[in-house]
Amino acid sequence: MGRGTPPPPLGHRCSLRAVGALSEGDGSPRATAAVNFTCMGPLKDLAVVLRLTDYSETSQIATLFGAEQGLLRVIAKGARRGTKTRFATGLDLLELGEIGFVPARGDAQLGTLTDWTQRETFTGVRRELVRLYGAMYATELIAALTEEADPHPELFDALLKLLRGLAGPPPAAPQIPIFQFALLAAIGYEPMLDACVSCQRPIPRGTPVYFSAGAGGFLCRDCEVTHVEKWHVSPRLVGTTVGSGVPSAWFDLLDYHLTHIAGRRFKTAPELARLLAQGNRPPL
Ligand SMILES: [Zn+2]
């Protein structure tokens, strides 16, 4: 390689012929164009594996959530475990890795994954059911409530924080409603929880509080009568915050809101709700 020629970035595939043209000092426009064309490598990102579906004997369709790309569906040729392929470690759910990919073009629905380098496996989430279900629920929410080609870097950060937290020593339960709230904020559905969403007045202490997903927040006693769709807020939540209140009660309320937005129940929600409620039981 000629003096001053930077090494090709990881993931780029410059042909020897093109690099040779550079090393000979051929600065003609034709040679430059050839190098640029040949060096157009795949795009790169840092991504978490949300979902894997078998596609053929050797391939999978991977739903990924990238720091810069957001939701991304790609075909991972030869990615299935046990096959002798370029993805030596195989892709697995709930892992973080560096990816190289070629985006979908034309009529193609799927891009193509060209590189996968595993970075974090969050194996600690598998030591307790509530941690595993918390992580699976988070990935289910992202797959259901974000769109392809719609980046959410702040949500990516919230997901990494959750996965690291669930894999580490902190208690699992309080982290889950914090993530639900971060996701709602990221997709523009942050609920109003500090006043009545209808009349904007503070909610008097000691009075029943309702929550309306359609209205997007708490309702005071005066306003709730005009709303059909509403949820009676647990008295345990009144006066607490998402990070400080009873986690299972916050989970139930925010899951109600998320379900309303998605228009369907999340598969992992009932079991996670059960596990969180179990955690609230006083010891015998
Ligand atoms: Zn009101």
Image: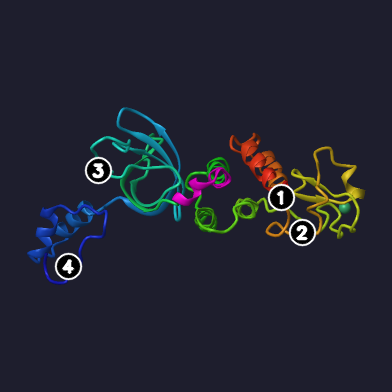
Where is the N terminus found, in terms of image quarters? bottom left
Q: Nearer the viewer, residue 210 or 33?
A: 210
User: Which marked residue is nearer to the observer: mark 1 or mark 4?
Assistant: 1
Question: Residue 241: image x %, image y %?
Answer: 73, 59
Where is residue 277, by image quadrant? top right
Q: Residues within 10 Å of mark 1 (few under 14, many from 20)?
A: many
Question: Residue 270: image x %, image y %?
Answer: 65, 36
Q: Which residue is mark 3?
A: 86
Q: Specify the label residue 250 is tagged with.
A: 1
Where is residue 119, by image quadrant? bottom left
Tag 3: amino acid? Arg
- Callouts 1 and 2 close, C-beta under 8 Å: yes
Mark 4 or mark 3: whose residue is earlier in sequence: 4
Mark 1 or mark 4: whose residue is earlier in sequence: 4
User: Which marked residue is nearer to the observer: mark 4 or mark 3?
Assistant: 3
- Callouts 1 and 3 close, C-beta under 8 Å: no
In the depicted structure, whether residue 186 falls above or below residue 227:
below
Which range of residues does the magenta coloring cover? 123-135
Q: Which residue is mark 2?
A: 240
Tag 1: amino acid? Trp
Q: Looking at the image, which residue is at 82% across and 58% down? A: 195
